[in-house]
Image (cartoon, rainbow, N blue to C red):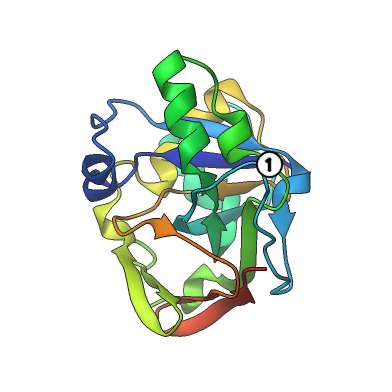
Amino acid sequence: MKIICIGRNYADHARELNHPLPEVPVFFMKPESAVIQNNNPFFLPGFSNEVHYETEIVLKIMRLGKNIEKQFAHRYYQEIGVGIDFTARDLQRECIKEGRPWEIAKAFDGSAVLGRFIKKEKLPDPAAIEFQLDLNGQTVQKGNTRDLIFSFETIIAYVSTFITLKTGDLIYTGTPAGVGPVKINDHLVASVEGQVLLDFMVK
């Protein structure tokens, strides 16, 4: 299983981090050891003093594909979920400043929290999915996939140009504005179209 993450895919988030808008999808990867499932807690790593949540719609790839044409990309996923791309923001800033890869800031153990999945045909509009994150009972992120810079189909077509997609692979599709830090005992609840798919604690 591969975890493919799309960066800077909502204009408001790119602006809040003072990043330019991308002309093509920006993607990076996380290892399988990054995944946390079943609402298990996320443990703050000792190597960072500024770990941020980034709430994202997640696609689960359901068939093998390489060089997928955009018009056929919708055939490669049937379920969507929600996840948190945890980022060691202090390490990321350092990596960007020095021109180094981001893996230590993005791909560490437990950095890809994953909620339940639902069939896309059960969504009111698969092209305009509303999702949000509540932190300790307060809504901190709200997004809608109609605001994506690059659509699900564009992402799948682009990524598959470089990397063969396989059944079970996960694509984190980007986060809207509102990212921020977490601390011990924080309670995070993520929902899609009003349905809670992820509910966990920070330890």
Residue 125 locus on image (x, y percent) = 34, 71
Report the residue that reaches farthest toward the top. 99
The percent coordinates of residue 100 (x first, y second) are 52, 17
* 25 is higher (above) or lower (below) than 167: above
Query: Up-down: is 143 above or below 161?
Result: below
9 vs 50, left or right, is: left
The x, y position of residue 19, in whole percent, is 27, 32
Position of the C terminus, as image quadrant, is bottom right
Q: Is residue 77 visible?
A: yes
Please identify the quadrant where the N terminus is shown.
top right
Residue 68: in sight, yes or no? no
Q: Is residue 75 left or right of residue 18?
A: right
Residue toward you, 45 or 76: 45
* Residue 179 drawn at (x, y percent): 37, 56
Q: Residue 47 or 33: which is nearer the viewer?
A: 47
Give the image quarter of residue 30. Answer: top right
Residue at image point 67% right, 63% down? 42
Is label 1 in a helix, a strand or a loop?
Answer: loop
Q: Nearer the viewer, residue 104 or 75?
A: 104
Q: Circle 1 sits on which residue?
A: 108
Dot 1 alpha-carbon crowd within 10 angstroms: few under 14, some 14 to 19, many 20 or more: some
